[in-house]
Each structure stands twice: as structure tokens, then as C-alpha cells.
Amino acid sequence: MMKKILIYLSMEKHASPFDLIEAYDAVDDLVVVPYAGVETNDVAGLINDTIFPRHPKDLVNTAVFIGGHDVVKGDEMMEKAVKQMFDPFRISIVADTDGSNTTATGTVVKVKEAVEKKGESLKGKKAIVFAGTGPVGLRIAALLVKEGAKVAVTSRKMDGAKAAVEKVKQVYNADIKAYEVRSDEDTTKVIGEFKPNIIITTGPPSVTLVKREIWGKYGFVEVLADVNAYPPYGIEGVDANDNIKDVGGKLGIGALRIGSVKNDVQKKIVRKLFEKQGAVIRLEDIYAAAFK
């Protein structure tokens, strides 16, 4: 029986043990071939050497996973790889640099679960993503818009927020609102103005972005979700292990609960790579896989 081979490409000095372990745990009898220190200009040659050794009918057993931490470079590598393939020499490929796609998926899956636990829908809800102009925050925003929510993101600089909003509009065809937030006073003002039902934080580790005294004063806030797994957490009062837990009358979702969905989804997309030849798996496909 022909072995399944996963070519793992990363721009980092070392291939991520996390990604490699997830891949091995996802598919039995899988061979993972890691390449580290890969530059965008290296991709064409690596793809050529990946698509030609096997007969086209056997290429369902070959796939590429792009990892690493540089999301912009990861997207560039993904597009370069896709353009290098041609019929019938196509293999399946996915990019999940910095875990941005799977983490965003895990966040929205848990938020959706929390809202539906209340017997309601994300459609028409209002969500704000604090420190949301990074890769994870923007992808969360895009998925929430596709679920019918009205979404805002914040940044410490309005120029950065506006640029991020424009990127989401171009890449994901999703309109979101931008706010500049640099202080607790700004946080209070923005929540009071936008009136979100859902507050999500995607800031750096060990930085509290939304204090309990702020979110606790607003009755319209229903769900609190934080992707920061290192204390102090992004939303004061929400622990990393909280799994849609009552926190001061709100439903709290912690980073480890989001992470458990993220890990499950990552395994699912590795398996999905070998379901059919030539699949190009993007954010929407990853999100859809979470529900299968």
C-alpha cells in the first residue's frame, strides 16, 4: 500500500514539533518530511520535487502543510505553491501559520456554541475583538461576519485598525468596524458605544485587555472569550480552563477550551488533505471541517 507523505514547509529555523506531532496523530502510517528555513523563492523548486515523483493518480497520497510563525510569508508561500501546480500534477495543500486559521476557527466554534446554548444565533449579534488586528483576530472577525454577526476590532493605532479592516474586506469580503483603544477609558467608551454582545481578546500573552470592572457593568455583554493561555489573562475573570462557564452573569470561554477545538480541527484538516487530490484548503474550509 502506498504511504501517505506530508511535506511540511516552515520559514522558521526549526520545524514545529507541535505541528509534526499533530500530523502524526491525525493519520495512521503517515510519513512527515519537514523542511525548515524555507524562503518563498524556495517553494517552486520544492513543489516541483514533490509533484513529479509519483504518477498523477497516486498524488492523492501526497500533500503539503505550511507552518511557521510568519503569517504573511506563509500566505505568500501558499499562493506560490498553488501557482506552481498544474493538471494533472496537483496535490492538496493548507497553510496554518502561527495556528491562525485553526485558532480563529476554535474561537468562533466555542462562541457559536455559547450563543446557541442560550437558544440564540450568531446572526445579528454584535462582537468586538480587542487587539484584533493580528492574524488570529482578523480571521475571527471574518468568520463572525460570515455567521451574520456585526463585528468590530480594536488596535492601539487607528491607522493600523483601518488597514486591517481594509485587508479583511479585500481578502474575506467582510465589513468590520475599527476602533482605537489605548487605555481602560478607551475600552469603556468603545464597549459603551458599540454595545457588543460578545467580547473576544486576541492580545499578547499575560496582558489584561478588558478588566472585570469594565465588562461587568454592561448587561448587553453575554459572552467573553480569550485566546491568551498565560496569566494574567486577556479578560479579567475568565480562566484559561473556563468552558462556557458562568462568570459574573456572562458565559466565559478560556484559551485552553479554544485550544482543544483548535487541536481537533488541525487533525481534521491533515486528514482532509488526503481525501481527494488537489484540494486547496483555506480558512472557510477549515471552519467548515470543525462541524464534520
Image (cartoon, rainbow, N blue to C red):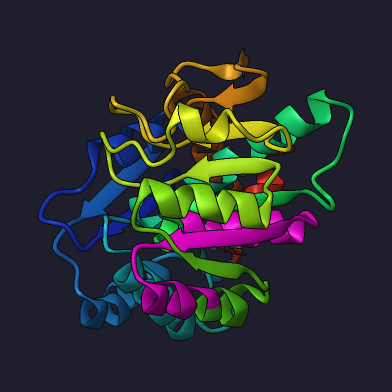
What residue is rendered at 79% in x and 45% in y? 122
The image shows residue 31, relative to residue 219, as above or below, that is below
Give the camera-side residue of 178 and 122.
Answer: 178
Residue 28: x %, y % from top left: 48, 29
Dominant secondary structure (helix, strand or loop) of the stretch shown in magenta: helix
Identity of the residue drawn at 56% across and 26% down:
253
Q: State yes or no: residue 174 in magenta.
A: no
Residue 37 % position (x, y): 14, 63
Residue 146: quadrant of the picture: bottom right
**Looking at the image, is 277 positioned above or below residue 173?**
above
Rendered location of residue 255, percent (x, y):
44, 29
Query: Magenta residues?
Result: 137-165
Residue 101 in sight: no
Say whether residue 260 is left or right of residue 105: left
221 vs 132, nearest the viewer: 221
Q: Is residue 254 above or below residue 292?
A: above
In x, y percent, where is residue 241? 46, 16
- Residue 163 left/right relative to 151: left
Q: Quadrant of the C terminus?
A: top right
Residue 204 visible? The answer is: yes
Residue at 60% x, 61% y is 152
Residue in the foreground of this view, choosing between 206 and 283: 206
- Total marks shown come to 0
Residue furthest out toward the right = 119
